[in-house]
Amino acid sequence: MKDELFKEPLSRATDFTFNRDVAAVFDDMVHRSIPFYGEVQNMIVDLVAHYYQDETLVYDLGCSTGVLIAKLAAALPGLKGIVGLDNSEPMIEKTRERLAGLPSKVPIDLVCEDLRDFEPKRASAVIMNYTLQFVRPLYREHVMRHIFEGLVPGGILILSEKVLEDSTDISRLFVDMYYQFKRRQGYSDMEISQKREQLENVLVPYKVSEQRELLQRCGFREVEIFFKWNNFASFVAIRSL
Ligand SMILES: C[S@@+](CC[C@H](N)C(=O)[O-])C[C@H]1O[C@@H](n2cnc3c(N)ncnc32)[C@H](O)[C@@H]1O
């Protein structure tokens, strides 16, 4: 279904939430709002294939409608299991619907829970795409520490986020270029600005340097960026052997 949630003027100011209306249009919204969304997922499948260890689990924290889970299960039939977590019931329902039609034999466990209360276990890959940015900064270190502890040695965290740069001018330019991208995807200036206002208090991006420092503080000694497009970055962080 096409994302037209911000097409008409909104009568009152509210914060963005992952409610039923958003879940209904999420697949269209995310493809038109995150540059190279599908290709980043393909790269993640390749990274998981490389780092996966027998008898371990793969986690997708903030799995939304389950697109990546479906790709992982199709591409890597030998996985012992995938755990998808999201605290939005409508998103989990969408994931359930998507997975119901798939022939994959990989066991998939879906959990509707706040990731701040969640501790992955025996993971060789934890994926968190565009989700940490919605967790209040106060809780981010706590979440990252739990993920580090839940990874087996040699396991990876894959983290994709909207980011800022150290330079304020470049950050501003990247955001402008991002709005150009959204216009090219067919969003009007009103849609762009109404969504930006709703996200203002709920999506808090870190600088690339802050993100790297957070990961290193939580125990990840190796942290690399495997994809970057203006104000979007994907990191791979390794729990050393
Ligand atoms: C921008 S979406 C990205 C989803 C997905 N990873 C993707 O790449 O398409 C963020 C998702 O994280 C979920 N989310 C946000 N905060 C969360 C939290 N504290 N605990 C669990 N899920 C959360 C939202 O419900 C939403 O489905």
Image: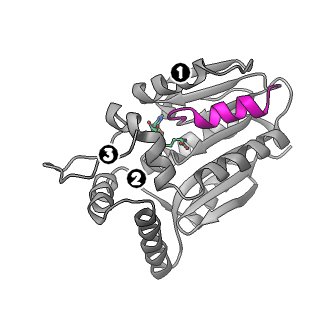
The image position of residue 187, as x and y in percent, is 36, 59
Q: Nearer the viewer, mark 2 or mark 1?
A: 1
Q: Nearer the viewer, mark 3 or mark 2?
A: 3
Q: Mark on residue 96?
A: 1
- Position of residue 220 in the picture relative to residue 137 (left or right): right
Magenta: main secondary structure equals helix
Residue bounds of the magenta highlight: 63-77
- Residue 118 visible (yes or no): no
Q: Secondary structure at mark 1?
A: helix
Q: Amino acid at mark 1?
A: Arg
Question: What residue sits right under mark 3 in the picture?
Answer: 16
User: Quick one: label 1 or label 3, which is nearer the N terminus?
Assistant: 3
Tell me how far mark 1 sits from mark 3, CA to CA: 23 Å
- Image quarter where the C terminus lies is top right
Q: Amino acid at mark 2?
A: Leu
Question: What residue sits right under mark 2 in the picture?
Answer: 203
- Position of residue 127 in the picture relative to residue 139 (left or right): right
Say which of 56 and 102 sits in front.
102
Q: Amino acid at mark 3?
A: Phe
Query: CB under 8 Å between callouts 2 and 1?
Result: no
Residue beneath the point at 79% across and 26% down: 79
- Image quarter where the N terminus lies is top left
Q: Secondary structure at mark 3?
A: loop
Look at the picture and state if 160 lies above or below 181: above
| Image quadrant assignment for residue 230 | bottom right
Tell me how far mark 3 sits from mark 2, CA to CA: 9 Å
